[in-house]
Amino acid sequence: MKKMEFDLKGIKGVIHYVGNDFVVCCHGLYSTKDSKKYVEMAELANDSGLSCIRFDFRGCGESKREFSFNLDDRVNDLKEVIDYIEKKFDDANYALFGSSFGGMVSLSYGSEDKVSSIAILSTPSHVQFEGYEADIIPYAEKCSHVMIMHGLEDDMVPYQHATAIYEKVKQPKKILFFNTDHSFSHRNERVKALNEAIKWFKRYFTSIQK
């Protein structure tokens, strides 16, 4: 595994490189790329032959720029990262792994651009805070190859949000529930979810014509 850091005009991240199939991690609203789930995803993905990218959205972790909870701003950050991947690596393929608001970012991006697959955790179907509202359902309706995972003990985003998203995404799709909370803080359940996501990613990476 080769580890590379990048700084895209203030958007900072890390590439764990083993090949040109990439899992791009999108963290939640106030989280960072260094959350346990993304560090563990990088390790497990590499062990399975997949590269992984962890980055901080604007105003989070090591990244600069002004913090924003606007969905479009965060999608633009993700676009910058993926554009960088495509320029740096020939024939790059990528899947998206998003948690909470990062899952909304993943679905929004996936509705506009081709990704091999998407896996989301603890993702709300809609949000409303500090005068800002976002509804992910119109984006979800345009997405396929989506795995939706949610904790049954999530008291921040009830699991009904997961079923609402599942009903709208296109086939192929899958939904799984785990005995854990919003952050997937129970390690055994978190690792189960990460491994399920990796299996999902590998299934659709292998279907791409190289």
Image (cartoon, grey):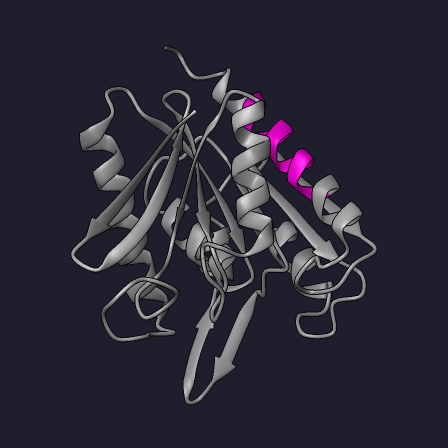
Q: Position of residue 152 (x, y in %)?
A: 80, 61
Please tell me which residue lies in front, 181 or 134: 181
Query: In the shown orientation, is residue 144 left or right of residue 190?
Result: left
Please tell me which residue lies in front, 138 or 158: 158
**Quick check: 61 above or below 93?**
below
User: Which residue shows up at 72% across the image and 69% down it?
Assistant: 158
**Total count of labels:** 0
Question: From the image, which quarter does the N terminus lie in?
Answer: top left
Question: From the image, which quarter does the C terminus lie in?
Answer: top left
Residue 201 shown in magenta: yes
Residue 196 shown in magenta: yes
User: Which residue shows up at 60% across the image and 56% down it?
Assistant: 165
Q: Position of residue 184 (x, y in %)?
A: 70, 57
Q: Position of residue 65 (x, y in %)?
A: 23, 70
**Quick check: 51 above or below 120?**
above
Q: Is residue 67 visible?
A: yes
Displayed quadrant of residue 162: bottom right
SS majority, magenta: helix
User: Which residue shows up at 67% across the image and 74% down it?
Assistant: 156
Furthest toward the bottom, the residue is: 131
Q: Which residues are magenta?
A: 193-203
Furthest toward the top, the residue is: 210
